[in-house]
Amino acid sequence: LQNPSESPVAVETLADVPEHVLRGLPEDVRLFPSAVDKTRLGVWATKSILKGKKFGPFVGDKKKRSQV
C-alpha cells in the first residue's frame, strides 16, 4: 500500500533518454535500472570493457574523480 500523503516517485525510462545518447552507446553497453538508484537508469556492460576504452560523443560536464 502506498501512503496517500507521499507523492509518487518518477521513474526514469528509455523514453526519457535523448536519441543522441542512445546512438552513442557502444554495442556492448545497455541502459537498465540503476543498482544505486532504482528510479534512474544506469549504464551496464554486457561484456568486459578494456581499461582506457573511449566511446562517445561526450555531451555534458566533465567531473573530477573527487566530484563523483
Image (cartoon, rainbow, N blue to C red):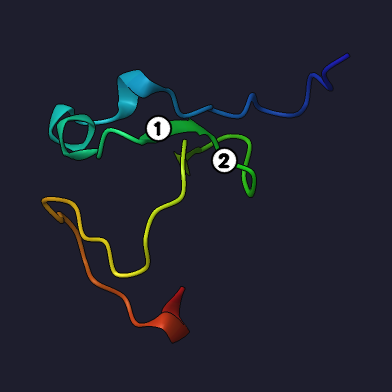
Q: Is residue 11 above or below residue 37?
A: above
What residue is at 43 percent from the left and 23 percent from the top?
13
Q: Whole-percent x and y of residue 3?
A: 84, 22
Q: Amino acid at mark 1?
A: Arg
Q: Determine whether the residue tagged by mark 1 lies in a helix, strand or loop.
A: strand
Mark seen at residue 44? none
Residue at the spot of label 1: 30
Q: Quadrant of the N terminus?
A: top right
Residue at the spot of label 2: 34
What residue is at 37 percent from the left and 60 percent from the top?
50
Q: Whole-percent x and y of residue 53?
A: 27, 61
63 left or right of 56 in image:
right
Q: Whole-percent x and y of residue 67?
A: 43, 80
Q: Amino acid at mark 2?
A: Ser
Q: Is residue 24 visible in the rendered structure shown here?
A: yes
Eye-nearest disc, 2 or 1: 1
Q: Determine whether the residue tagged by mark 2 lies in a helix, strand or loop.
A: loop
- All told, the count of numbered labels is 2
Q: Of 4 and 55, which appears nearest the observer?
A: 55
Q: Of 57 and 27, which appears nearest the observer?
A: 27
Q: Is residue 49 above or below residue 24?
A: below
* Alpha carbon separation for disc pair 2 and 1: 11 Å
Which quadrant of the view contains residue 8? Answer: top right
Q: Whole-percent x and y of residue 63?
A: 31, 75
Q: Is residue 13 above or below residue 61?
A: above
